[in-house]
Structures are given as C-alpha cells and as structure tokens.
Amino acid sequence: MRCRRGNPYLRTLLIQAAQAAVKKKGSFYYAKYWRLRSRLGSANKAKVAIANRIARAIYHILKHKKKYKDLGAHRAEASHDHQVKRLLGKLKALGVDVNFHYEQKIVHAKATVEVVA
C-alpha cells in the first residue's frame, strides 16, 4: 500500500497521530490496527491505513461541525454471535451436520469426511 501524493508535512503528522492512536488500549484505532496488521502483514502498512482513517474522520468532523467520539474497541471487532453464525454457516457449506443450542452455547457436530484420491 503506497501513500498517495499530497502534502508531505500533513502525511507525517497523520502517521505520527496514527502511531499515538494505536497505542491507546481500548480505542477503536487500537483494535482496528491489530486487525489490519495481521491482515496486511506489515505494521507500517497498517499505520498508513489508520492515518488514512484519521484523515477521513478529521474531514467529516470539520465538514459537519461535530465533536469526535471514539467508537471503542468493540466497534472494530466483529461480535461473537456474528462470528459463530458465520463459522457455522461455513461448516454447513462444507457438509458438516451441525446442531447449535444458543441458550447453552453448545455445538454438536457430526463430520463425515470422504477423501477421494
């Protein structure tokens, strides 16, 4: 991921702001950084992405004249229930018979795997 051309001083300030933002535990940018870092494979690429996100947030704050509100780390992470439903759907697509009891959060699965060489 390359930085777009623009004001080099502003780019430096945004990346420094991103470096500070990703160190604040419990913040939206902290959680988003760790997800991006694992997906992009580079800490610097993730910081540039966070700097881009901060720039867009600043633009919207200035345009709409609103106060900044941190969304919190839980906003950047997918909910546990959503992940469970998504993964159960993947298992069913693979042909695994899955029974899920939501109240008790117990998963019973019968897997029949056939390997054809």
Image: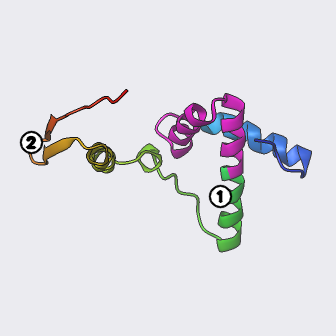
Q: How many marks?
A: 2
User: Residue 15: horizontal and vertical position, in percent?
Assistant: 75, 39
Q: Which residue is mark 1?
A: 57
Above or below residue 66? Residue 83 is above
- Figure quadrant of the C terminus: top left
The kind of residue tagged 1 is: Ala
Q: Secondary structure at mark 2?
A: loop
User: Is residue 48 magenta-colored?
Assistant: yes
Image quarter in which the N terminus is found: top right
- Where residue 69 is drawn, which disc sits there? none
Q: Residue at x 48, y 53 (%)?
A: 71
**Amino acid tagged 2:** Gln
Magenta stretch holds residue 35: yes
Instruction: Tell me whether circle 2 and circle 1 mark residues in contact (CB < 8 Å).
Output: no
Check residue 104 in the rendering and tell me which mark sits there, or answer none.
2
Residue 93, horizontal then vertical, whole percent: 31, 48
Q: Is residue 116 above or below residue 73?
A: above
Q: Secondary structure at mark 1?
A: helix
Residue range highlighted in magenta = 23-52
> Rounded to the nearest whole Å, what is the CA distance between mark 2 and mark 1?
40 Å
Q: Residue at x 66, y 44 (%)?
A: 50
User: Would you call the spot at circle 1 few (<14 residues within 10 Å), some (14-19), or many (20 or more)?
Assistant: few
